[in-house]
Image (cartoon, rainbow, N blue to C red):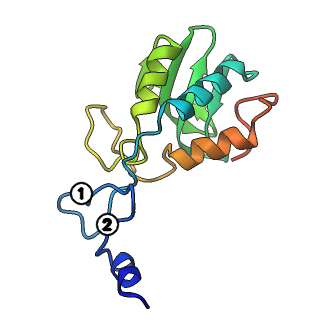
Amino acid sequence: MPRRLLRVLHGGARAKGAAPQAPGARGAPLPDDTPFGEDLARRAVAFLEATSAVWGEAAIVRTHRDYTGHGLFHDRAAGRFFLSRSLDGWPCAPAYLSFADAAGFRRWLAAQSDASLSGQVPSDIPGFERDPGNQRITRSFVEDYLRRHRNGGASGRQGS
């Protein structure tokens, strides 16, 4: 095997865009720290605004039974966007973060990364680090969700 591949397999090299290892971590690199960017954030907001919502809340969330990790939600009645833990695809109160308008939510989401939403990086959000890496919001999750639901469908809670 080429030496470079061996180094990557054994943690000796960092993949392009991957965050450095967390202090004290046992060789486990943090997820990618590349910001999601304006384009993905804009598409996520447009999806949440255009989706026919169930009970007034559109979502980008997993929908299997029990704990479904974190989701991005839009409460149309209140006009707010928020990040929350979810159970059976529904948000759990209280929300981790809430934004009064699409512009604030879009700016926040554009600046996020797999690493910042992984729960492995300390944050000022109480309880956010609980269950790190388990069903978190990632770039690939949001992109895949938007691709699968590109026509909006009947609900923001489709598929898993």
Classify 23 as above or below 42.
Answer: below
- The residue carrying mark 1 is 22
| Inter-mark Cα distance, 2 to 1 | 8 Å
Mark 2 neighbour density, 10 Å: few (under 14) some (14–19) many (20 or more): few
Mark 1 neighbour density, 10 Å: few (under 14) some (14–19) many (20 or more): few
The reply to whether callout 2 and callout 1 are in contact (CB within 8 Å) is yes
Residue 72 x, y percent position in the rendering:
55, 31
Question: Residue drawn 81% across and 31% down?
Answer: 153
* SS assignment at label 1: loop
Q: Of the two numbered discs 2 and 1 on the same chain, state the one appearing first in sequence.
A: 1
Amino acid tagged 1: Ala
Residue 114 x, y percent position in the rendering:
43, 47
- The residue carrying mark 2 is 28
Question: Residue drawn 47% across and 35% down?
Answer: 37
Quadrant in the picture for residue 127: top left
Q: Nearer the viewer, residue 5 or 85?
A: 5
